[in-house]
Image (spheres, rainbow, N blue to C red):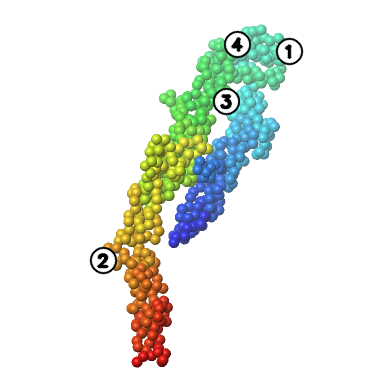
Amino acid sequence: MTCACSSGRFASDGACSICTKGMVCLGGSAPPSSCPTGLATVMTGARSFEQCLTTAGFGRLVNKTAAGQLLVQAQPCQAGSYNAGGNSSPCQRCGSGLTTAGEGAKSARDCVAPAGSYMGGGSGVQLLPGAENVSDCPVGSYKEGWNLNPCISCGEGLLTESTGAQQRELCRPTNAGWKPDGLCRALGGCPSLAAKAASLLGDQQGLPAAPAPPALRASPHRSLQQRALTTATSAALAMAALSYRLKKAWTTADTPTCECAAGRFWSPSAQDCLFCPKGLYCSGGDLPAGECPAGLATKLVGARTLDQCFTKPGYGRISYRGADERLAVAASVCPPGRYNQGGNSMGCKQCPPGLTTVQAASTAYSQCVAPPGYCMGNSAAKKCPRGTYTDSFNTLSFCIPCKAGLTTPDEASTSIGACKLATRGYHLTVTQSNRTAAQQTGNLDTSAGGNSSTNSSNGLQSLKDPFVASIAAALCPPNSYQDGETAQQQCTPCPHGLRTEQAGADGVALCLAPPGMQLLPGDGSISDCPVGSYKEGWNLNPCISCGDGLLTESDGAVSADACYVPPGFGIVRAEGSGIIAAVMCVQGMFGRSAPNYDTRSTRCMPCPRQHCHS
């Protein structure tokens, strides 16, 4: 008899060893199992997958399969969430407005304010993690990178054209920082800008707006030098000026002209340079707003260059230098097995080894699943061993076992239909009526033991095999055996009439003579032990003689207790060997008048004198 290991232990070198940390041991003869990707046990002796806790950067999910089996899974914490690990919780969200630089954040300290924003009540103010007031950097300040740093002031005389500036280069001179001659020359070449400046200056002083740009051009220095501009007017004028730039082709002898600055485009209807819409980029000048390559888009208004075209979900970006050595970008759909959540300049990320996605253009790690014939191992796909299968893309941490007595010819089986070989001690049974019904309906006959790995919670569809419901396995009947994996529907009869102690014999070695029978050399079949002999147990031993003169009531005695001394006989024991025999009592001696089963002390006794005969 073989003893099975209890749960929390596994068989190793003939003994049951305690399950190692990080693994799960279900007991029996099963080897240790890995927790699903992103999970691990935190102590030795784990008994079930419920003891698989999160590793840092992953959140745990618990569902049930269609068959009612517990399904423990994990997925990386998405941007804006985190998990420190060692628990059974899903990922925790960062505070309102905070996010993380990518997937897999492990701590609340990874929750930061995006570039161009800060935590607190103003520039130079910083709050502790967990604060929930994140604001854009105000005009005149900026913040680079994803962090908890405060916004940095541009400095005196510098402003940004809007809130949320993400780099120092966006700090531009205000009116006070421009040389009057440079600003006036710019205004002289830009009628729209000149009109805006005149309007701003007139409104500031309570004066009517300038009637026409030429009036402003007639005395530009006087207008800018003699009027005291408030900070608000100066900032507004600077922002208006930032919509334009001087063309580089003009000389001091030419009439200065201007064009739209980078991040803006010329609108004929508005007769002005407008912000570049979100999703497009604008190089400035006379060029219209440009579309990003397919699969890419800008994330904010005012994008200036092609490099600000970031990925749409499910696409990966490729950057390269064109023939003119200028930066060029392109995008391609993430193929099966890769994903990208979008909003970045990265290529598609590869799923862990062996894992894939059900379709192209996947957007998250959670869409990485095991293909048919595999299940989820520790950070990789695990091939289904023989005797198991999965018939769909799945996130199972185990493969589905074949019905009792069935196995598969190979590893990585993709259908219950691959369970078509009987294991040792079994034979196949095929019911033709069930097979016909399955063919007609195209459905599995679950009453015949059909299995399906359909997981309704993730929407993955199982593949159906209409033929498998008619195939099952049954134990070899008594007195037969099956010593291999086979497609036979009958087991092999034991030779020479030998028999098995029970059904399900997995080899000819279990074909034995039952108690009271033997197989003599040269005989073609087993026979009963003759009178005066016996045999105990199931084995191939010969029958044992009760001893000379000792008898049994019939053939086929199964125990030494069946041996008896005949009436009128007594037991004698040979000196040295201890062999007993029954001998007829001589004259003057007598034996018992009935069979005596006490063969140890039944001897011939002397007759009483009055009964002795000469």
Name the residue carrying label 3.
Answer: 300
Which structural element holds mark 2?
A: loop
User: Which residue is painted at 43% across and 49% down in the image?
Assistant: 404
Q: Position of residue 476 (x, y in %)?
A: 37, 54
Q: Is residue 221 above or below residue 447?
A: above
Amino acid type of the residue that numbered disc 2 sits on in the rendered structure:
Gly
Query: Which one is closest to the eye, mark 4 or mark 3?
Result: 3
Q: Position of residue 304 (x, y in %)?
A: 54, 23
Q: Pointer 1: residues within 10 angstroms few (<14), some, or many (20+)?
A: few
Name the residue carrying label 4.
Answer: 191
Mark 2 to mark 1: distance in Å? 132 Å
Query: Which one is closest to the eye, mark 1 or mark 3?
Result: 3
Query: Which one is closest to the eye, mark 2 or mark 4?
Result: 2
Which structural element holds mark 3?
A: loop
Instruction: Say which label, 1 or 3, has the lower sequence index.
Output: 1
Q: Quadrant of the C terminus?
A: bottom left
Name the residue carrying label 2.
Answer: 522
Residue 431 at least partly seen? yes
Q: Quadrant of the N terminus?
A: bottom left
Instruction: Say which label, 4 or 1, has the lower sequence index.
Output: 4
Residue in the foreground of this view, choosing between 302 and 418: 418
User: Which residue is painted at 61% across and 27% down in the image?
Assistant: 165
Amino acid type of the residue that numbered disc 4 sits on in the rendered structure:
Pro
Instruction: Say which label, 4 or 3, has the lower sequence index.
Output: 4
Q: Are marks 2 and 1 in contact (CB under 8 Å)?
A: no
